[in-house]
Amino acid sequence: DAGITQSPRHKVTETGTPVTLRCHQTENHRYMYWYRQDPGHGLRLIHYSYGVKDTDKGEVSDGYSVSRSKTEDFLLTLESATSSQTSVYFCAISAGQLLSNQPQHFGDGTRLSIL
Amino acid sequence: GESVGLHLPTLSVQEGDNSIINCAYSNSASDYFIWYKQESGKGPQFIIDIRSNMDKRQGQRVTVLLNKTVKHLSLQIAATQPGDSAVYFCAESRNTGGFKTIFGAGTRLFVKA
């Protein structure tokens, strides 16, 4: 299995509070991604990174920000959490170039509940 | 519009039988397809992939078939085992000048002993 660790694995917090989720990889892969998974939907891309300090928005980026200061770490921040952001969040990594179609490998997710 | 869908949200098979999970995609520009398996409480696990210049690819007990004419993808699991019980996703990926992978909502496979 790809060396991907997500923390925390579970979190319950209140509306309006900031939340940061961490993804740590030991594969030295260049590309990292954050997705959310909700019932009835496929995985939806929030943000992705193609290198240190290089990030871009996905299809559901509103309300989220990311940072990547080291190759191995990709942080997802909810500046002011809302109930609509209750979800399971997955980090993924991939090797190779964006245009060469490499499979993504996923962590085990963070279950986030916002009350 | 864009879609990566699965014909059956739930599939139940007898242990030892073969399973076939189907997927439709709508964009003929998609050039890379992936199947994932997701067990409860875990992240999606890569199973097998196929590029658009191929129509069949085999792995260990799994085969992916790609029919570009009708934009159809299938995953065949031979001799299905209880450990195969999970949700299976298909995904399509294409070079749009950036990067985009679209995931289907998934099919849940139940294996009856």
Image (spheres, rainbow, N blue to C red):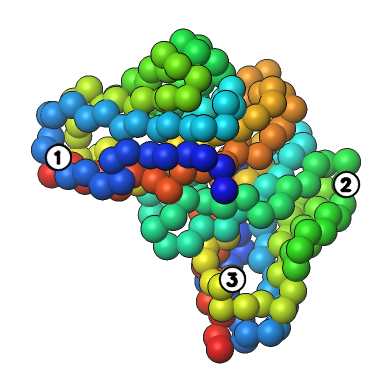
Residue at left offset 63%, top offset 46%: B91
Look at mark 3 in the image and give the residue it sits on. B84
User: Alpha-carbon distance for marks 1 and 2?
Assistant: 47 Å
Label 2 is placed on what type of residue?
Met
**Horizontal side, residue B55 vs residue B102: left or right:** right
Q: Position of residue A103 (x, y in %)?
A: 66, 39
- Picture disc at residue B54: 2
Please give the chain letter of the residue carrying mark 1. Answer: A
Using the numbered discs, state the Cα–Cα distance from disc 2 to disc 3 in whole angstroms.
Answer: 25 Å
Task: Point out the tag, 2 or 3, that comes first from the N-terminus.
Answer: 2
Quadrant in which the N terminus of chain B is drawn: top right
**Type of residue at label 3?**
Asp
Secondary structure category for the residue under label 1: strand
**Residue at the disc numbered 1:** A13
Q: Is residue B95 visible?
A: no
The furthest residue to the top: A53
